[in-house]
């Protein structure tokens, strides 16, 4: 553990030195958690389509290049930067599972397609149409909870609660554990880009131990008493040899966290975005039902819930005129690509009249396109339309506090007056 601590501290020190010297790649990686990185993404863009950092890691904010990397089979998924040696359960032996590393999110073909097919039926267009009435009911119930309160935290009292209830219903999980799930989402967002200090490693181990224990127990209960929920479906697939136990637990974790964090960030970022643009705010108030889908897409473009994604070169290739060796990591700055002036006019402002907001890369692209994108869009559209229809005089009533993460972008606390 001492050797691991020394390695982490040396790596962090090198990163800080490079950032201080002005290296744009290092400056992005050294971004303080919870701070917007858009100025630093523009520094990367100014340095070229594909920029190499001192460690050999490449980075791009080009929309065209990000799209190519995300879609091309020449580039594969890559696990997080947490060393596998550090992920031993608190109070136990063996290795913990990781929601991203050990689910289909970090697996390449052909295994990726096989695993994705197990959960994909829950997110088809037909399945989403079947969910619309339920989501609408949940939104109305949660808006009722805000009635009569002069001020409220829009995230904790609405934006998180709606998708949390929906994904719990889909997974067959108790809504009573909502506060636990929210804490997991916040803590995971803070470490999803990798542990850089011994303290962060300890927090990672503690979080993954807690989640693995919870979902292992849940899967055991579903094996003994199966239902029609998504967890039961995955348990049956595991019993049939189609998934590993490790993959089962990791996929449960990924679906839960991804199932509410993304939508909560869409709602929170949309509200902040509207108040940053008074003209667009008034435009939306005139037709919230008609413009809600557009607001969701433009919010996804302007403030990507996941700011970047990493791919690895599978075989030697040439990209943007540079020869890349196999194993070279590439950071696709999704949030930077979404503000590429070659694709989006006046890219740094929210515009409900934009003709191409759907061209964003916030849900990635290619085979790893976010499986829950349609659910997040559905929830965001219904929630935002109903929120402003019910409370047209909604106002931000204090300082907005953002998630303590470099990757996840969205308010953690958003005080509003209804």
Image (cartoon, grey):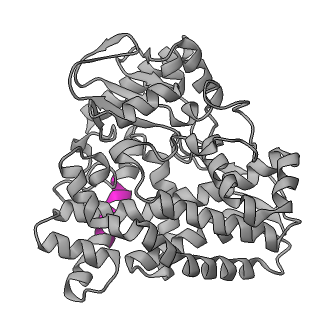
The residue located at (16%, 70%) in the rendering is 238
**In the picture, which quadrant includes the N terminus?**
top left
Quadrant in which the C terminus appears: bottom right
Q: x, y (%) of residue 72?
A: 32, 33
Of the pair 198 and 64, the residue shown nearer to us: 64
Q: Does 287 sit above or below residue 102?
A: below
Q: Is residue 386 above or below residue 113?
A: below
Q: Is residue 358 left or right of residue 11?
A: right
Task: Read off the magenta span.
Answer: 205-214
Secondary structure, magenta segment, majority class = helix
Q: Position of residue 161 (x, y in %)?
A: 59, 72
Quadrant assignment, res 359 = top right
Residue 321 on image: x %, y %: 38, 10
In the image, taking residue 351 as reference, residue 363 lies left or right, namely left
Q: Residue at x 49, y 17 (%)?
A: 49
How many circles with numbers are drawn on the protein? 0
Q: Is residue 132 visible?
A: yes
């Amino acid at each position: 553990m001492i050797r691991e601590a020394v390695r982490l501290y040396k790596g962090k020190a090198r990163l800080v030195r490079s950032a201080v010297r002005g290296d744009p790649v290092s400056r992005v990686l050294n971004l303080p958690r919870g701070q917007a990185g858009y100025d630093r993404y523009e520094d990367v863009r100014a340095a070229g389509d594909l920029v190499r950092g001192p460690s050999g890691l490449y980075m791009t904010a080009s929309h065209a290049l990000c799209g190519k990397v995300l879609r091309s089979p020449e580039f594969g998924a890559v696990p997080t930067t947490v060393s596998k040696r550090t992920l031993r359960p608190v109070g136990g032996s063996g290795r913990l599972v990781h929601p991203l590393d050990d689910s289909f999110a970090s697996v390449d073909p052909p295994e990726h397609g096989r695993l994705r097919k197990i959960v994909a039926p829950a997110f088809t267009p037909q399945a989403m149409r079947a969910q619309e009435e339920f989501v609408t009911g949940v939104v109305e119930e949660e808006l009722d909870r805000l009635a009569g309160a002069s001020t409220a935290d829009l995230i904790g009292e609405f934006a998180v609660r709606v998708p949390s209830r929906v994904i719990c219903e889909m997974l067959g999980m108790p809504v009573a554990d909502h506060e636990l799930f929210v804490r997991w989402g916040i803590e995971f967002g803070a470490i999803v880009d990798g542990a850089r200090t011994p303290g962060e490693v300890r927090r990672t181990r503690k979080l993954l131990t807690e989640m693995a224990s919870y979902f292992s127990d849940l899967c055991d209960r579903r094996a003994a008493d199966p239902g029609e929920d998504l967890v039961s479906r995955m348990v049956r697939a595991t019993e049939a040899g189609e998934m590993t136990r490790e993959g089962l637990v990791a996929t449960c974790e990924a679906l839960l966290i991804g199932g509410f964090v993304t939508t909560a960030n869409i709602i929170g970022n949309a509200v902040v975005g509207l108040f940053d643009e008074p003209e667009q705010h008034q435009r939306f108030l005139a037709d919230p039902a008609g413009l809600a889908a557009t607001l969701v897409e433009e919010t996804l473009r302007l403030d990507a819930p996941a700011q970047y994604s990493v791919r690895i070169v599978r075989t030697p290739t040439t990209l943007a005129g540079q020869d890349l060796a196999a194993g070279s990591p590439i950071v696709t700055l999704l949030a930077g690509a979404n503000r590429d002036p070659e694709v989006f006019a006046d890219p740094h402002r929210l515009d409900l009249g934009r003709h191409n907001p759907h061209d964003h890369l916030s849900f990635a692209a290619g085979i790893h396109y976010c499986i829950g994108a349609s659910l997040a869009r559905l929830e965001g559209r219904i929630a935002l339309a109903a929120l402003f229809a019910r409370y047209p005089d909604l106002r931000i009533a204090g300082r907005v506090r953002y998630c303590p993460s470099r990757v996840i972008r969205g308010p953690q606390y958003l005080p509003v007056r209804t």
